[in-house]
Image: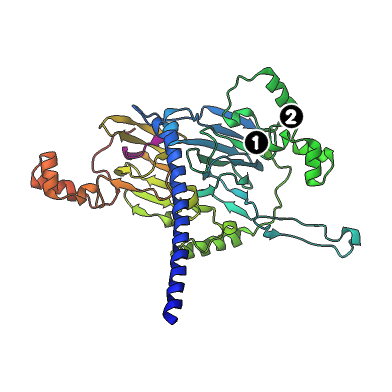
């Protein structure tokens, strides 16, 4: 009898395990299928003969700032499947609430500010609710303060991650200009539309140029655009809006932002008084986050409390450091777990005078390099051994390094600093020179026969460099 009961329990457990495993397999298969569909859409775009330094080709002026967009039809960006945007905020500039059709990473090049992301279904955990004792009974229950989801302070060097479809806003509360560069991964599996850059605004009357639209529009559409706004509420009936929000139609019309000519970065009338911890409290929280990073595995985070930012420019966080050459820092799914779902990561590099970032290739990602300071020379080689790029790059310029293409960077006399967005949540490189290089890992006999060199030359090739991937130049360099 006992044996029969044990057998029945065992069979039930086996069936349950099989069912769960089948569901996991189906989920994994669906994910792989989505990835394959994304790859099929864009992999044919990487037939590149030459690479070019890229500049933004569209500049959109707003009341309190400017927005610059790189042309996504350029071959390099088509290959990487991304869109790059740069925002410049004046003091008290507010980027109106909006969301994208694909995940994005933002890097704070200059300045500081505050940022909010509205995750659906999450509670308003920042509250300043006060109820007056002198309120009449009919007014009891009405809020005299405010409550909203978490507001995060950011500073220069922060990387901010945002999933597709999550509404966000940005405000410059600093005393100087705020500059940020943003990468939107249009080829990501989360984008179920197409490769076109689509930004959905909740407020304002954004120009059609923000969407990457062509300038030539039919006169009928132009006339309609002048009469109505271009945000999400503009296309909804006023009475429907009034009923949905339980407001009057006059207020509903204001949601549609008719005749709003301020653009997408507007100037706040006065400094924001949003509920948030003081700067000292925020810094203490960040210090506690850094202390926990060494032991956290991401399971402690929930959807509503996910960390969205990580400072990548802090010298104390350098992953690779050579006092004579420079430093490299990375943010990936290990130190910012939300990147697991975004499937993006980033690298911040600083090269000192004439410092070299050893020749290497990106194993599993495209690298979209934006120069934040200084200048340097980059050389890139394709799979046929052709040099597809050999030129100087400088502050404000963009360079795409396709997956597996070999690349080497060398700083000029003024130094070289960059942020590289990568299209994998755990992007890896394989150095060609240095202590951790593929050359060091290959036996002498293989090198001797491959390059037709002596054993002594093979040993020089392997052991003359003891650094990892940041190298001090041993040759005199010309000024770039």
The outermost residue toward the bottom is 2
Instruction: Residue 33: give x, y in percent of width and height.
Output: 44, 44
Kindly identify the residue that appears in the image at 42 percent across and 38 percent down: 39
Q: Relative to the observer, which residue lies in front, 132 or 37?
A: 37
Magenta-colored span: 399-411
| SS class, disc 2 | loop
Q: Relative to the observer, which residue lies in front, 419 or 137?
A: 137
Kindly identify the residue that appears in the image at 82 percent across and 46 percent down: 246
Kindly identify the residue that appears in the image at 72 percent across and 34 percent down: 234
Instruction: Residue 54: give x, y in percent of width and height.
Output: 44, 30
| Residue at mark 1 | 264
Instruction: Residue 354: give x, y in percent of width and height.
Output: 32, 41
Q: Is residue 407 magenta?
A: yes
Kindly identify the residue that appears in the image at 68 percent across and 40 percent down: 202
Q: In this view, does 113 lie to the left or right of 39?
A: right
At label 2, counting other C-alpha atoms closer than 10 Å, the crowd grade (few under 14, some 14-19, many 20 or more) is some
Q: Can residue 113 be seen in this view?
A: yes
| Residue at mark 2 | 228
Q: Quadrant of the N terminus?
A: bottom left
| Disc nearest the viewer among 2 and 1 | 2
The answer to which of marks 2 and 1 sits earlier in the sequence is 2
Residue 319: image quadrant is bottom left
Q: Quadrant of the C terminus?
A: top left
Q: In this view, does 290 lie to the left or right of 94?
A: left
Look at the picture and state if 215 lies above or below 301. Answer: above
Residue 250: image quadrant is top right
Q: Is residue 325 magenta?
A: no
Secondary structure mostly seen in the magenta stretch: strand
| SS class, disc 1 | loop
Whole-number angstrom distance, CA of label 2 to CA of label 1: 15 Å
Q: Can residue 373 be seen in this view?
A: no
């Amino acid at each position: 009898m006992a044996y029969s009961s044990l057998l029945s329990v065992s069979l039930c457990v086996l069936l349950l395990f099989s069912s769960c495993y089948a569901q996991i397999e189906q989920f994994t298969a669906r994910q792989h299928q989505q990835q394959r569909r994304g790859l099929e859409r864009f992999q044919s775009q990487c037939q590149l003969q030459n690479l070019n330094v890229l500049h933004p080709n569209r500049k959109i002026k707003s009341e309190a700032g400017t927005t610059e967009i790189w042309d996504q039809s350029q071959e390099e960006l088509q290959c990487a499947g991304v869109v790059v945007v740069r925002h410049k905020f004046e003091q008290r500039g507010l980027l109106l609430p909006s969301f994208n059709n694909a995940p994005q990473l933002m890097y704070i090049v200059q300045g500081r500010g505050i940022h909010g992301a509205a995750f659906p279904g999450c509670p308003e955990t920042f509250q300043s609710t006060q109820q007056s004792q002198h309120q009449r009974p009919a007014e009891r229950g009405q809020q005299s303060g405010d409550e909203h989801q978490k507001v995060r302070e950011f500073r220069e060097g922060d990387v901010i991650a945002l999933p597709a479809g999550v509404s966000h806003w940005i405000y410059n509360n600093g005393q100087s200009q705020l500059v940020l560069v943003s990468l939107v991964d249009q080829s990501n599996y989360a984008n179920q539309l197409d490769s076109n850059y689509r930004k959905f605004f909740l407020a304002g009357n954004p120009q059609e140029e923000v969407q990457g639209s062509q300038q030539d529009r039919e006169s009928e559409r132009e006339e309609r655009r002048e009469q109505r706004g271009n945000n999400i509420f503009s296309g909804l009936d006023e009475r429907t809006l009034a009923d949905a929000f339980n407001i009057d139609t006059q207020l509903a019309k204001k949601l549609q932002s008719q005749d709003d000519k301020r653009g997408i970065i507007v100037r706040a009338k006065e400094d924001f008084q949003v509920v948030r911890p003081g700067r000292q409290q925020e810094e203490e929280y960040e210090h506690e986050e850094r202390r926990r990073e060494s032991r956290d595995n991401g399971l402690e985070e929930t959807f509503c409390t996910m960390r969205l930012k990580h400072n990548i420019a802090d010298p104390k966080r350098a992953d690779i450091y050579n006092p004579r050459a420079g430093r490299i820092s990375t943010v990936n799914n290990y130190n910012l777990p939300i990147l697991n779902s975004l499937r993006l990561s980033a690298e911040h590099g600083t090269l000192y005078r004439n410092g070299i970032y050893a020749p290497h290739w990106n194993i599993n990602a495209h690298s979209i390099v934006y120069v934040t300071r200084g200048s340097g020379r980059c050389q890139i080689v394709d799979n046929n051994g052709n040099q597809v790029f050999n030129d100087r790059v400088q502050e404000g310029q963009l360079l795409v390094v396709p997956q597996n293409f070999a690349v080497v960077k060398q700083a000029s006399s003024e130094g070289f600093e960059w942020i590289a967005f990568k299209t994998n949540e755990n992007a890896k490189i394989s150095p060609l020179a240095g202590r951790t290089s593929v050359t060091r890992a290959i036996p002498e006999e293989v090198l001797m026969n491959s390059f037709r060199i002596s054993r002594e030359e093979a040993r020089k090739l392997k052991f003359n460099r003891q650094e990892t991937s940041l190298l001090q130049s041993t040759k005199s360099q010309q000024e770039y």
